[in-house]
Image (tube, rainbow, N blue to C red):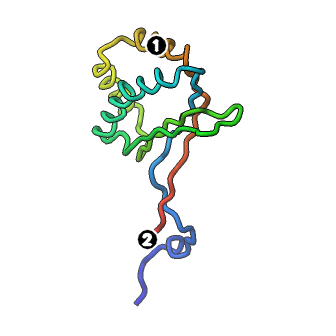
Amino acid sequence: MAFSIPALAQDDPYPFDGGDYVSVTGIDISDGADLKYALWLAGEWRANEDFAVSQGWTTRYEILINEYPRKGEPDVYLVRYFPKFVDNAEGDRRRQVMMARYKRTEEKLQEESAGRATYREVNGNMLLRKMEWKK
């Protein structure tokens, strides 16, 4: 008895299925500002990431420290895992939810970000994708 499995599915030798997307942000911290930045991460940043996980927007997040950074490499990596990209309408809805959560204006948030720029610099961003073994 023949099964109606498409030929492409039968012949796909690739051993992975795509999993979560992984956003990685590299951060350089100014000398002497490690504690200041760590406290900000442990406070507002963590609360916002926990909220995103509770909403299902992300599946998890983590902070990785580069123990031996070479010249030009970030000191810290902020890593977020998310299952899918959202359309513009959902992105706008999430932004409105977060703005209500912040209880601050866009101008105030920009000012606070500029304040953090005095002791940390975003070195760059990467978008990766986790691969899951096919079963």
At x 32%, y 35%, the residue is 50
Crowd class of label 1 (few under 14; some 14 to 19; many from 20; radius 10 Å): few
At x 55%, y 75%, the residue is 11
Q: Can you tell which quarter of the image residue 68 is in? A: top right
x then y, percent, for residue 93: 33, 28
x then y, percent, for residue 87: 41, 36
Q: Identify the mark at residue 110; answer none if there is no mark.
A: 1
Q: Earlier in the sequence, mark 1 or mark 2?
A: 1
Question: In the displayed structure, would residue 69 be above or below residue 17?
Answer: above
At mark 2, the secondary structure is loop
Identify the residue position indicated by label 2 in the image: 135
- Where's the N terminus, which quadrant? bottom left
Question: 65 or 18: which is nearer to us?
Answer: 65
At x 55%, y 17%, the residue is 119
At x 55%, y 46%, the residue is 128
At mark 1, the secondary structure is helix
Q: Identify the mark at residue 3; answer none if there is no mark.
A: none
